Amino acid sequence: MILILTSIIRYSAVMIWSGFCGLLALIGVLIDPSGTLFFFASRIWGTISILICNVKIKIDGLENISRDKQYIFVSNHASMIDILAVLHVFPQLRLVFKKELSYIPIFGWALYLGEHILVDRSNAHSAIKSLDRAAEKIRSGGNVLLFAEGTRTRDGNLLPFKRGAFSLAAKTGTPVVPLTINGTFSIIQKGSIIIRPSVIELIIDNPIPTENINSREEELLLMNKVHSIMESLYIPQPIL
């Protein structure tokens, strides 16, 4: 009972905080073309939400990346906590997010109008356009993150990857960084509001060069390589 009550309080607080940060980000989109206010809102949203949920983050491999280079981060996805964690660690990351999130009042509008990249997975032509927008963000100096599984895992295991992130890497010649997130599945599972405070781990692997990838077959080899790396580091969690 205590867990249910604290979860309701935490979940409600995160929703209220998300609305405030969404409004701040939306204002930032309208008055600050530099994106500074938008990314500030993104970072405090992630950081404070993590604190509200009483989640601790352990980071391994931060030394593997450089602040003055562009990367495509490829991550697994087990919980909404994943997004909060990556925005806390990488405040100016551009997320590739599904179209359905843009329907959320204020928060979704800020995502749609801001620096993040909407993808319509039901429309192949639109999905290609989304990759083009992501490529533009990279060329302008941004880093992009894609959840390579395409959706959150429902059973705590790593899912097969979609090809989009690796097509983007080949298109831009941008190094791919495998980003393995452990421990979030047990904190809050898909379709639940029960929040179980815990420690999560972000493992940042070495960047993988992509400038010589010129075919679909080479993209698939890269995809399988990244999946193997993350599978060796990922710790499956049971459904609670």
Image: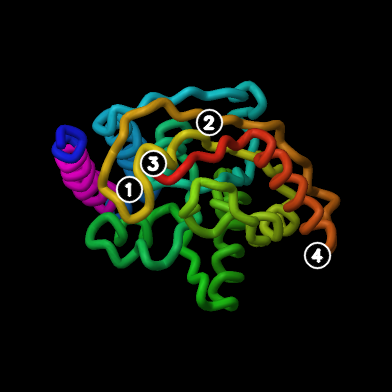
**Measured Cα–Cα span from mark 1 to mark 2:** 31 Å
Q: Amino acid type of disc 1?
A: Asp
Determine the residue positioned at 53% across, 31% down. Answer: 202
Q: Mark 3: give few (<14), some (14-19) or many (20+) Cα within 10 Å.
A: many
Tell me which numbered mark, 4 or 3, is placed earlier along the sequence: 3
Residue 217 included in the magenta stretch of the image: no
The answer to whether residue 80 is left or right of residue 124 is left
Residue 20 included in the magenta stretch of the image: yes
Q: Which residue in the structure is indicated by mark 4?
A: 216
Q: Which residue in the structure is indicated by mark 1?
A: 32
Label 1: element kind? loop
- Give the magenta-colored segment's residue range: 7-27
**Measured Cα–Cα span from mark 1 to mark 4:** 39 Å
Q: Amino acid type of disc 3?
A: Ile
Quarter containing the N terminus: top left
Q: Where does residue 208 sit, x and y in percent of width and height?
A: 75, 40
Q: Which residue in the structure is indicated by mark 3?
A: 81
The answer to whether residue 69 is left or right of residue 31 is right
- Nearest-to-viewer mark from 4 and 3: 3
- Nearest-to-viewer mark from 3 and 1: 3
Tell me which numbered mark, 3 or 1, is placed earlier along the sequence: 1
